[in-house]
Amino acid sequence: METLNSRIRTVDVARRAGYSVQQIRNLERDGVLPPALRTASGYRGYGEVHVRSALAYRALAAGVGPVEAKRILRAVRDRPIHEALALLDAAHARLHRERTDLALAKRAASAISAEPIDDVRASDSMSVAELAAALGVRPSTLRHWDTEGLVVPDRAATHRTRRYSPAQVRDARIVHQLRSAGYSVDTLRTLMPDLPRGDRSADVDAALVARDASITARSHALLDAAAALTRVIALATS
């Protein structure tokens, strides 16, 4: 049990956890850290559990983001331990799905970009409805990609109907795979304009490698968080 006799100053907690003094106070206010002990004159008194909680939050935030990290730390404090561990399990499961989706995106992007587009005829083009059905997305999704400049179809001169050429269908398939792997529209907007010039491979491959590195970094962060949470739980129950 922490007592005022073992009080750690706010500034020392901040230094050990790599935060500012105000950030430590904010974490206490948000319920990430247990309430600090108070002296008779009102000064905060922190203990080792506060340091470990701040370190756990730091690692969790790197792995799952600050919102989910706060949720997990609050659960450790206020809920049965199995509920807190279930939240951590869910975070690992989400990373596993991201890795699976990324592997699929890598294979799909490679295969799709290698497909030859020869002997193109006007009849080979697809309408919005046809391409949406082929990809398994809503027509509104294709219109959104058009607006964002990700996959811009041709338009008939007479009635402005969208028609996707085989090359544009290929681009749509790549966008669909990368979106499924978690890439944002903003990220893809920087990649897709190079497709018609044949530069897709290097840029998309670099993005896939960066995504892989991000997932790996978050996995390491969750390992660090698990170790810190183990100490938090031990201190809280001692």
Image: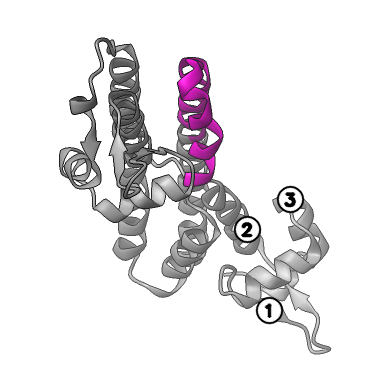
In the rendered view of the protein, which quadrant contains the N terminus?
bottom right
Tell me the kind of residue under disc 2: Ala
Q: Disc 3 versus disc 1: distance between alpha carbons? A: 21 Å
Q: In screen coordinates, is 156 left or right of 44? A: left
Q: Report the residue marked by disc 2.
A: 54
| Residue range corresponding to the magenta coloring | 185-214
Looking at the rendered structure, which numbered label has been put on residue 18?
A: 3
Looking at the rendered structure, which numbered label has been put on residue 228?
A: none
Residue 183: % across, % down: 44, 40
In the rendered image, the vertical position of residue 54 relative to residue 180, given as above or below: below
Q: Report the residue marked by disc 1.
A: 37
Q: Residue at x 30, y 34 (%)?
A: 164
Tell me the kind of residue under disc 3: Gly
Residue 149: % across, % down: 48, 42
Q: In screen coordinates, is 145 left or right of 1? A: left
Residue 36: % across, % down: 67, 76
